[in-house]
Image: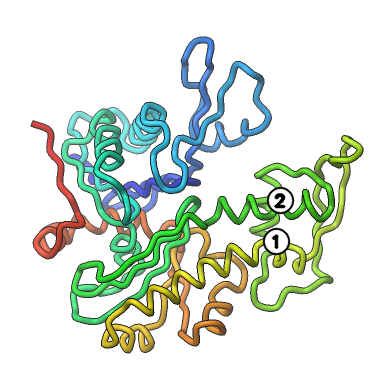
């Protein structure tokens, strides 16, 4: 029997769920290629370890940026490698649903579909991120009630109001996990004249972010290069400094939720006030983000269970709902190769 596969094609991570098994793979969207021989050396975690550490002839690429495909060929290789990893060399080709950001163009959609077809998909469907996030969070969207989902990924943050299996209003901004990492890199450079790598910035974000009540006493030691002396240096960074570094980015996300609420029909806003906001994606785990949104917008905020894998779980669940989803709206596109 062929498996149904759901893929959350993220800028930072690719998460794959399989029907009946749940999430089977969550690895960085990174691929390493030998530029002399054009041979793929590693994908996912192995390639991620090479970031910033590989010699000249090894190119370590992130083929997805800001939620869209920036390198078609490498994305196809990445998807193909991962699908083979989870499905093996089975005879029956799987049906595949791929989750895409809500503001993807036709050309970008086509690139995603090509990638899944060359990886051995029998049928390829596309589903919008907010719908998949809602399904994964276990929300019943079929009723005429408004739900607001905020999906904070690596490249984009998607904010959407969903009712009756459809997206009523939505926003997508290019402020998310990666831009928060970059903000920390810039802050350390400007404030402490210390140059740190993306991995160190990501570690600081995960360990030290406290958006609700940051303290100057909770600290962590990090290493980097002093820009003035050009020599290695180690220093202690506090929660308060990380808050200063990421504040602008985080409030841009909060502002996008506010502007979406302003554009939402009043009946649905009433529902959202009762149901609260659902946070999904890796960015939902930023320390104190739910409390900050609650305090700023005066709306209850809930973090979905296992937020990082939420979209992939919802993507594979969509197979059970494919008839109702396809009837109600055109957001789930079906492509079949002749």
Q: Earlier in the sequence, mark 1 or mark 2?
A: 2
Q: Is residue 195 left or right of residue 109?
A: right
Which corner quadrant holds the C terminus? top left
Badge 2: residue crowd in 10 Å (few <14, some 14–19, many ≥20): some
Occupied quadrant, residue 47: top right
Note whether 11 is above or below 44 in the view shown: below
Note whether 193 is above or below 131 in the view shown: above
Which corner quadrant holds the N terminus? top left
Residue in the image at 17% along x and 61% along y = 321
x, y percentage for residue 147?
Answer: 32, 77
Q: Residue furthest top?
A: 37
x, y percentage for residue 302?
Answer: 46, 77
Residue in the image at 37% along x and 49% along y = 8
Note whether 119 is above or below 24 in the view shown: above
| Numbered disc 1: secondary structure | helix
Residue in the image at 69% along x and 54% along y = 184
Depth check, front residue: 1 or 117: 117
Badge 1: residue crowd in 10 Å (few <14, some 14–19, many ≥20): many
Q: Is residue 311 left or right of residue 30?
A: left
Total marks in image: 2
Name the residue beneath numbered marker 2.
186
- Give the alpha-carbon distance from disc 1 to disc 2, as whole Å: 8 Å
Q: Residue furthest right?
A: 229
x, y percentage for residue 179?
Answer: 57, 53
x, y percentage for residue 9?
Answer: 38, 46
Task: Please report contact status of discs 1 and 2: CB closer than 8 Å, yes or no.
Answer: yes
The image's colour scheme reads rainbow
Name the residue beneath numbered marker 1.
245
Depth check, front residue: 2 or 69: 69
């Amino acid at each position: 029997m062929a498996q149904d596969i759901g893929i959350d094609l993220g800028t930072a991570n690719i998460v794959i769920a399989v029907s009946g098994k749940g999430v089977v793979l969550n690895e960085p969207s990174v691929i390493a290629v030998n530029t002399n021989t054009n041979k793929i050396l590693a994908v996912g975690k192995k390639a991620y370890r090479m970031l910033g550490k590989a010699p000249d002839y090894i190119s370590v690429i992130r083929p997805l940026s800001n939620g869209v495909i920036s390198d078609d060929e490498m994305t196809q290789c990445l998807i193909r490698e991962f699908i083979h990893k989870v499905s093996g060399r089975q005879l029956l080709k799987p049906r595949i649903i791929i989750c895409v950001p809500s503001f993807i163009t036709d050309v970008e959609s086509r690139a995603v579909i090509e990638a899944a077809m060359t990886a051995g998909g029998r049928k390829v469907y596309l589903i919008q991120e907010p719908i998949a996030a809602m399904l994964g969070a276990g929300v019943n969207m079929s009723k005429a009630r408004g739900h607001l989902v905020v999906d904070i990924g690596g490249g984009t943050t998607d904010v959407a109001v969903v009712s009756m299996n459809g997206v009523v209003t939505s926003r997508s901004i290019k402020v998310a996990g990666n831009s928060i990492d970059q903000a920390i890199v810039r802050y350390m450079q400007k404030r402490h004249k210390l140059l740190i790598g993306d991995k160190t910035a990501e570690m600081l974000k995960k360990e030290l972010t406290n958006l609700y009540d940051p303290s100057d006493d909770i600290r962590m030691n990090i290493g980097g290069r002093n820009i003035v002396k050009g020599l290695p240096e180690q220093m202690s960074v506090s929660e308060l400094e990380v808050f200063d570094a990421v504040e602008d980015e985080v409030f841009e996300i909060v502002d996008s939720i506010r502007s979406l609420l302003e554009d939402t029909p009043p009946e649905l806003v009433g529902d959202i006030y009762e149901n609260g906001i659902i946070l999904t994606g890796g960015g939902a785990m930023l320390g104190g983000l739910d409390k900050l949104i609650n305090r700023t917008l005066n709306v209850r905020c809930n973090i979905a269970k296992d937020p990082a894998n939420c979209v992939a779980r919802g993507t594979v669940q969509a197979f059970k709902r494919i008839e109702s989803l396809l009837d109600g709206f055109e957001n789930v596109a079906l492509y079949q190769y002749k």
